[in-house]
Amino acid sequence: MDPSIFKAYDIRGIYPAQIDAEVARRVGRAFIDYLRARRIAVGHDMRASSPELAGGFIRGVRSQGTEVVDIGTVGTDMLYFAVASANLEGGAIITASHNPKEWNGIKMVRRGAEALSGDAGIKEVKEAVLAGRFADDPGDTGPPVVRKDIREDYARHCLAFIDPARVPPMTVVLDAGNGMGSVGAEAIFPRLPLQLVKMFFELDGTFPNHPPDPLIEANRQAIMARVKAEKADLGIAWDGDADRCFFIDDTGAFVPGDFVTALLAESFCRKEKGAKIVYDVRASRAVADRVQAAGGTALMNRVGHAFIKKRMREENAVFGGEVSGHFYFRENSYADNGMIPALLVLELLGAGSQRLSELLAPLRQRYHISGEINSTVKDPEAVIQRIDQRYRDARILRMDGINVDYPDWHFNVRASNTEPLVRLNLEAYDQPGMERHRDEVLGLIRQ
């Protein structure tokens, strides 16, 4: 078995060369051995190999004497909801999220939808499987599988985050990218006074229209053009497993995830005095500025859903957001969700007379961000050291990679968890300054 399939936040590899039903079966057994769970939920996405992998995983779980609640073809955020709402001892979803069609994987959680990570859970599962502890197959044994449709309960849960009466009639373009966003969207959005323009709602794990990652600019060109063509008020897109949400404003422009975090964080701070908000090290200063101005506390944190959720639990934070389009909610068991932020933005647009582009205008005028820029390098740690030496006169933070902070500009450089890449996110208070500093830092990274 290829040990590289065990990642920082999940298990992920190419099917069937790296991950197949037999690998899934062994992982299922190891997962239950680690968790000591008696009842868990299992779901899967729309990839062609997902039913096969789900079958293998369920076989392994049942052979350990654990009951499986099969919730069928769902998004990752729906799996989180199923585990937390029924107080199950854990759960897993077969998905490779936004990866290309050749990939598949397994995301696992314990009670309360708390994610397993490389630091806690995935490491133990990896060690057990690689040691061959679960190579034997006891056969098709164990408790019968219970099948459950959670779509109605999930829709009610998400809608409880807003007052639907405050959502005004508007035209909204939805791009599911042939991924799992269509399942949640079909259950939720017809209940609101919206004229819906649906794009790529057919479940198709070959992703015939565009890859399922709207964070990549090329993959959102279709929805940006459609928003303009329809003269729509808003565009909403999801990644392959629908736990991330992305927005296009009424002008057809993409809205960076940190700007969405700033707007929603500000809204939460108005509702809850002294609210704590968790955001990641890459984010625009807009997040902390808006939170502090609204009387809240902004808490910077490591990148990654397992780390954000852990910090939110420790701090009792009401909301968290990442540049990558992950948004987390205390009243959603601190888990990320792809539908709740969409509903909150719709409600926000109904709260006043401004369009989304007008709400964003002050942010776009003050905060000029580079977006995430990847560079392939041989030695990521050497890059970090060069940056540390070059910018010694700045305030340096080594929370996740390196943050370099000057009064009028700042940036983060961090190594990828899975590839020989370093990722740059940079911001300045004027566009020429941003471009100048961006090119300077990229030159240092790529030398």
Image (cartoon, rainbow, N blue to C red):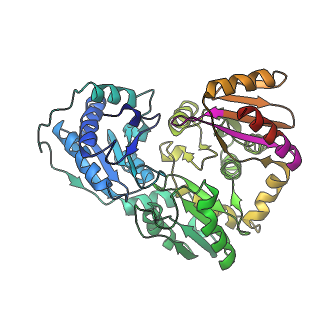
Across and down, in percent, residue 101 comes to: 42, 56
Query: In the image, 218: left or right of 156?
Result: right
Q: Is residue 37 visible?
A: no
At 37% across and 31% down in the image, what residue appears?
Answer: 3
Across and down, in percent, residue 321 comes to: 62, 45
Query: In the image, 406: left or right of 420?
Result: right
Q: Is residue 209 visible?
A: yes
Placement of the C terminus among the 4 image quadrants: top right
Does residue 213 lie above or below 356 as drawn?
above
Across and down, in percent, residue 362 comes to: 83, 55
Q: How many marks?
A: 0
Tell me the quarter of the picture where residue 284 sits.
top right
- The foreground one among 146 and 280 is 280
At 77% across and 60% down in the image, what residue appears?
Answer: 359
Does residue 322 lie above or below 384 as drawn?
below
Query: In the image, 163: left or right of 403?
Result: left
Placement of the N terminus among the 4 image quadrants: top left
Does residue 84 lie above or below 420 as drawn?
below
Tell me the quarter of the picture where residue 87 sits.
top left
Across and down, in percent, residue 402 comes to: 69, 28
Magenta-span inclusion, residue 83 = no
Q: Over which residues does the magenta segment extend?
A: 414-436
